[in-house]
Image (tube, rainbow, N blue to C red):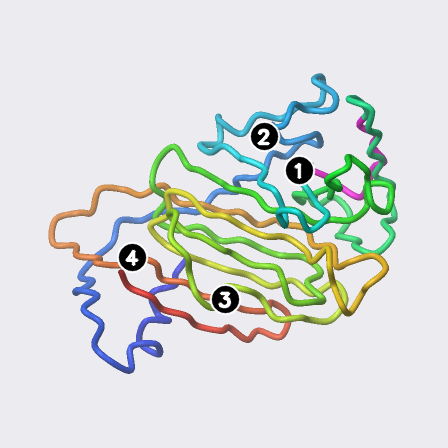
Amino acid sequence: MHKFHFLAAMMGTTLGLGVITSAPAAHAVSLIPTQEGEIKTNLACLDPTKCLSTTSLGYTVTSLDYDGAGGYGASRLFVDDRATSNTYQGQGLKVSFGTKDAGTNTGINEYWLRPVAITESGKLPENGQLEVGRFLFEFTNVMSEVTLDFFDVEDIGTGVLLINGKSVNNLMLQAGKNNNIQALTFYDVKSFEVQLGNGHSQKFPKYGDGVNLSGIEGIPKAVPEAGTTFGLSALAIAGMFGLRQRKKILSVS
């Protein structure tokens, strides 16, 4: 993944990024399990036989309260391929995914992280088909680069809230057309907090705006080769695939 060519267009002013003289070759790998099931978080999986651990992929996931006392609690997170129907049942809840969703339909034979909103009272909006949640991803090692793909962002409210525990600006995505895919890429990442969907959407007041997450690709941070100076902190690039437009954001701490 060659993203350094964006720097030339972005550096209208000198920001003290240092000089990039060379960089070790690296290839991004997908960080999404290629198996359907519920991602293991701080919430016990509904069905322990369908629980997916991400520790072997180098990260853990914590489900966070979505909006305090606003109506939604901590969401569950699943890996789903719309080609098949799946049911997860336990703890008094039953989550069913069909081959056609009420409003968020990803491609066939594609693995997407699918949040399931749960109200503070423990109910499942839309019978488990409201894709809304807030999650903390923490990596075992610093990732030199992380890319996220967001599916079907049709209202504001989706994006990255924190990187390495610090608030970031301008990493919330704009509303797009139905089934659009938007992307965020950022660098030198130990953790990030992401918000998916808008459970209080004014555009969809009855159902909310559901969003799935995929394309998590990461490159573990390597020891720079001799003569290499990066000096990059939180370089973020947001863009909408399909329109092939990219909103470029740069922040240096």
Q: Which labelled disc corresponds to residue 109?
A: none
Per the rendered image, the range of residues in magenta is 74-88
Residue at 11% over, 54% down: 227
Picture coordinates of residue 136, whole percent (x, y)? 51, 42
Distance from Cα at disc 3 to Cα at disc 2: 27 Å
Mark 2 or mark 1: name the one nearer the start of the chain: 2
In the image, is 103 to the left or to the right of 224?
A: right
Q: Which residue is mark 2?
A: 41
Question: Are dots 2 and 4 in contact, CB under 8 Å?
Answer: no
Quadrant in which the N terminus appears? bottom left
Residue at 77% over, 67% down: 178
Mark 1 or mark 3: name the one nearer the start of the chain: 1
Q: Which residue is mark 3?
A: 238
Question: Which amino acid type is marked by label 3?
Answer: Ala
Q: Which residue is mark 4?
A: 233
User: How packed is label 4: few (under 14 Cα within 10 Å), some, or many (20 or more)?
Assistant: some
Marks counted in the figure total 4
Q: Which residue is mark 1?
A: 77
Q: Quadrant of residue 6?
A: bottom left
Mark 4 or mark 3: name the one nearer the start of the chain: 4
Picture coordinates of residue 140, whole percent (x, y)? 38, 32
